Amino acid sequence: MELSRVAPELRGPMLRITRIPIPMERPWGRRVIQTLLAVMPAIKLDGVSIEQPRDAAPSVRVYRPAARRSPAALFWIHGGGLIIGRAVQDDRICALTARELGILVVSVEYRKAPRYPFPAALDDCLAGWRWLRREASHLGADPACVAVGGESAGGGLAASLAQRLHDAGETPPVAQWLFCPMLDDRTAARRDLDGVNHFVWNNRVNRFGWRSYLGVEPGADDVPPYAVPARREDVHGLPSAWIGVGDIDLFYDEDRDYAERLRAAGVEAAFEVVPDAPHGIIAWAADTSITRDHLRRALTWLERTLETQEAREQAQS
């Protein structure tokens, strides 16, 4: 892909993060990234405190706004292609959401492939979700008004978690807040996309991520339930969703298709496209006007959705 395809404001930040390529397909490459994330300092944001409760299993990070305006909460799942990543990398988006909406945010750690293939990551996310609901009253949150969100692989895990909770008959999230979600292994099976060489996250690395997670080549005829959210045939009854993605992101087509399938099934689904944006801008281009505008629209949708749920609860009480 030519650099000219990328919005001018995003080119500098993107080139800085891709300047030194680290091969994530190699164990030493993933170790380097995980080590760097392990020593990454927490991002402090005025008006938000970050806590790490010792009793939580798996580990979580709790973001508390000084000015609490709502009992609603967000359960957040970080990205990393299912093979890398730590919750600390998303301190900025989690703290910003907590402060701007005045809600509690909880971000979960989870195990990574290939050492821990499916369903390890999803099991950890489910355990973190249950911890939040169990501790909701102590945390000052309403367990009936919790949204689930995530970016990239975290967005895919959030979608899978919503499906699993729906089928188990557990209280589902009131909304899905998905940034460039990794939803469909069949994208990785398309060899024609290898030559496009998408910025930030290309299809060769995408194939490795899915293969590591599934334990089989992407695009296989059968995959376990909840392993690949886009493979679900019946999406009726799932929570409303906001899906945001750049139009030159590798995941653009699969994200658009999932949003369209949700709408066709009667599920409210907003699909937000960022022109000329590659993958993951909320992680590496937070200081650009493009990302700020993108986040503003996303936060507006989430706030409106949570307020609607709160109003429904009050009307029923």
Image (cartoon, rainbow, N blue to C red):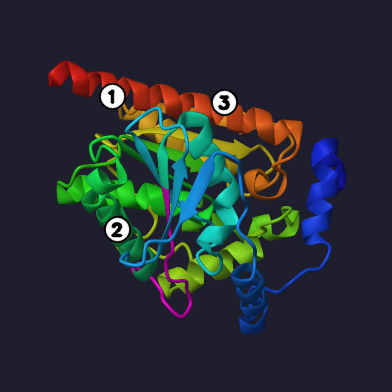
Front residue of 9/64: it is 64
Amino acid type, residue under disc 3 in the picture: Arg
Q: Is residue 53 left or right of residue 85?
A: left
Up the image or down, 202 lies above or below 239; here it is below
- Mark closest to the chain's N terminus, 2 or 3: 2
- Marks 2 and 3: CB-CB under 8 Å? no
Residue 269: % across, % down: 42, 29
Residue 114 at least partly seen: yes
Q: Secondary structure at mark 2?
A: helix
Question: Going 53% across and 57% down the picture, which residue do you hit?
Answer: 79
Question: Going 74% across and 39% down the picture, which residue do you hit?
Answer: 287
Front residue of 186/299: it is 299
Residue 222 at least partly seen: no
Amino acid type, residue under disc 1 in the picture: Glu
Q: How many residues crowd mark 1 within 10 Å: few (<14), some (14–19), many (20+)?
A: some
Whole-Å distance between the Cαs marked 1 and 3? 20 Å
Up the image or down, 113 lies above or below 138; here it is below
Question: Going 84% across and 62% down the picture, which residue do you hit?
Answer: 19
Magenta span covers which residues?
106-119
Q: Which residue matches tag 2? A: 126
Q: Secondary structure at mark 3?
A: helix
Q: Is residue 260 left or right of residue 272?
A: left
Please check the rendered image and state whether residue 126 is part of the magenta-colored stretch, yes or no.
no
In the rendered image, the residue lying farthest to the top is: 315
- Mark closest to the chain's N terminus, 2 or 1: 2
Q: Which residue matches tag 3? A: 297
Q: How many residues crowd mark 3 within 10 Å: few (<14), some (14–19), many (20+)?
A: some
Q: Is residue 45 left or right of residue 265?
A: right
Q: Which residue matches tag 1? A: 310
Residue 117: % across, % down: 41, 74
Residue 114: % across, % down: 48, 77
